[in-house]
Image (spheres, coloured by chain):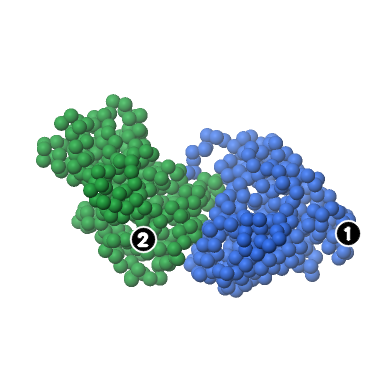
Chain colours: A green, B blue
Amino acid sequence: MATYHEARTRALERALAEDPALLVLGGSLSLPFNRDDGLAARHPERILLPPISEFATAAAAVGASIAGLRTLVPVSTSSFLFYGFAPVVNEAANVRYLSGGAASAPVTFHMMCGSRRGGGAQHEHTSQAMFQNVPGLRVIAPGTPASVDGALHQALTGEDPTILIDHILLAPFEGELAESPADVSAPALLRDGGDALLVSYSLMLQHCLQAARILAEEGLDVAVLEVATLAPLAVAELVEATAGHGSVLFVDESRAAGSPASHMLAQVVQARPSTRTRLVCTLDAPAPFAIQLLDELLPTPARIAAETRALIGA
Amino acid sequence: VSSNPAERLERFAAMLRARRFDETLIEHAELVVGVFHVSIGMEATAAALALTRGPDDLVMLNHRNHGALQALGSDPEAMFREILGRDGGRQRGRGGSLHLCDPEHGVPYTSAMVAGGAALAVGMALARKRLRRPGIVFAFFGDGAMNEGAMHESLNLSSLWQLPVLFVCESNAREHAAHATATQAARSLHELAAVHQVAAKAVDAADADAITDAMREAAAALRAGGGPGFLEARTTPWPGNATFIPRLSSGRLELTCADGDAWSKADPILRETRALSADGVALADLLAIDQAIDERMRDAFERAAAAAPAQGAHATEGVWG
């Protein structure tokens, strides 16, 4: 067993050991607010701290990747990358395609998305919905210790520009950790059950597991599927994994419009129109500061459980 | 350069490749879907790049990339095929004129975003430095890029980290009374680089010797371990760029030693023609070089135009690795 924070730190240490050229262009993956992972103290020579220049930093990371230097850019709060959006969505994502395959940009941007509670509207964006709409970016949003391990391995050894969607509130969650990193490219069934299937990723995956435990006490047997790789979405594997489930809920902290979950739902319904589905997302408003207002918007375990009961008529 | 006749003729040929490529394209502009940009008037800067670039150096170009690629020696037929959306383009129909690149000549990828490429070049230079690999990075961009905040972040970062990148601003800004350009409050573009402690100077880029010497000197400083450099390569706007799609309003280049109109006095190729002639090179020899290049461009274009269209069935390939 390991916590998510421990798994993330271990995966990063492994990546630094395996690739002596890997450069961390920014601070730590666990900041802000998480216990420091000690990376800066242990490997000062592997970390380059840029000035507050998000455009130049993001572009430099992309340019470095084109020229053979792999970088990991800890963006911290995802909205900080809005100043550096252009190099990511307009350059990194296009390098392989526009160069006819002559070049690629294997760079990783790590960012904290979703509500950390008390961050307010400018620090709690669900940016994954923005990035998943850009072909060429690999968007991975792990929700367990095993999947953050696999996600960092994929990002730091793969050939795609990768957006690692992380969540500050995931740090204490515990889970099993295998010797070698898990493959996160296809969905993974975390809990089986015949009454309904909850499909989710990142922190909402943990909320789904909690909702399944609540429903189990009521005698309902609910399965939970993790889809860590949001783009490119493994559509065939997702459709296969949802087969046999008449009721499927897609749970996402993003706002519904253009969200990863709404795309998954569309793919499943298109393949199997008889499936009863429900989309559970954050309501359409910026993240409010006050916690009682915030909890009106977010999918909580209680809300997910209620939506599940409603869908299956329990 | 003036003291080395062979090199001088090599530079002359590089300038002519750039010019004849663009003229040939403009004559068939109706075959191009969308907009394209030509490098007419900037050929001396392109040729200076070709003479200065070493085998380990990388080059980041921009939307106006034809001239530099031709000067560097990229295959004109492959470029025409890409621009015309034909099979056999290096970018397989995915890039077009805006994104022409050629890794064999040091151009792995071309961004068409204003200041976008220059910012990437800083990272390429970071890679060279961190990996302790030889080579420097040339970043080409226009005067408009200096209006972007991205340029200033990039100049600061490259200077702060002492990265081997040579910023080359191909300026075709019109003369302006008190400002560098109509959209720039600073008095000159190179002083904007200088405030970031980047070694910067302005050069008359219609003077092939001046821009070649300046680029070589700046590149040598970078190779010796110095931080970034900045050249403001000043040119006179070519009248044919006044329209959205360029037109040969001044006609095809005719090599002559005679003085012509105002534009011909600012034309780097005609200036060099007159200089070569004054130094004793026969005009007939220059015309022979020109004719061979002109024929090569026309042949390359004809073959490209006759090629099959790029295959749409492959449009979804090569997005992810």
Mark pair 2, 1: CA separation: 63 Å
Q: Is residue B57 visible?
A: no
**Which residue in the structure is indicated by mark 1?**
B282
Q: Is residue A17 visible?
A: yes
Tell me residue A183's x, y (percent). 32, 48
In the drawing, what numbered circle is on residue B132? none
Q: Is residue B59 left or right of residue B243?
A: left
Tell me residue A301's x, y (percent). 20, 44
Q: Quadrant of residue B190?
A: bottom right
Q: Residue at x 38, y 44 (%)?
A: A129
Tell me residue A290's x, y (percent). 26, 51
Q: Chain of mark 2?
A: A
**Of the pair B59 and A153, the residue shown nearer to us:** B59
Q: Quadrant of residue B10?
A: bottom right
Crowding around mark 2 (Cα neighbors within 10 Å: few <14, some 14 to 19, many 20+) is some
Crowding around mark 1 (Cα neighbors within 10 Å: few <14, some 14 to 19, many 20+) is few
Q: Residue at x 78, y 47 (%)?
A: B294
Q: Residue at x 81, y 57 (%)?
A: B265
User: Could you tell me which secondary element the residue under label 1 belongs to?
Assistant: loop
Is B16 located above or below residue A300 in the figure? below
**Which residue in the structure is indicated by mark 2?**
A15
Q: Chain of mark 1?
A: B
Q: Is residue A280 left or right of residue B48?
A: left
Q: Is residue B126 left or right of residue B13?
A: left
Q: Residue flagged by tag 2: what amino acid is it?
A: Ala
Q: Is residue B131 left or right of residue A294?
A: right
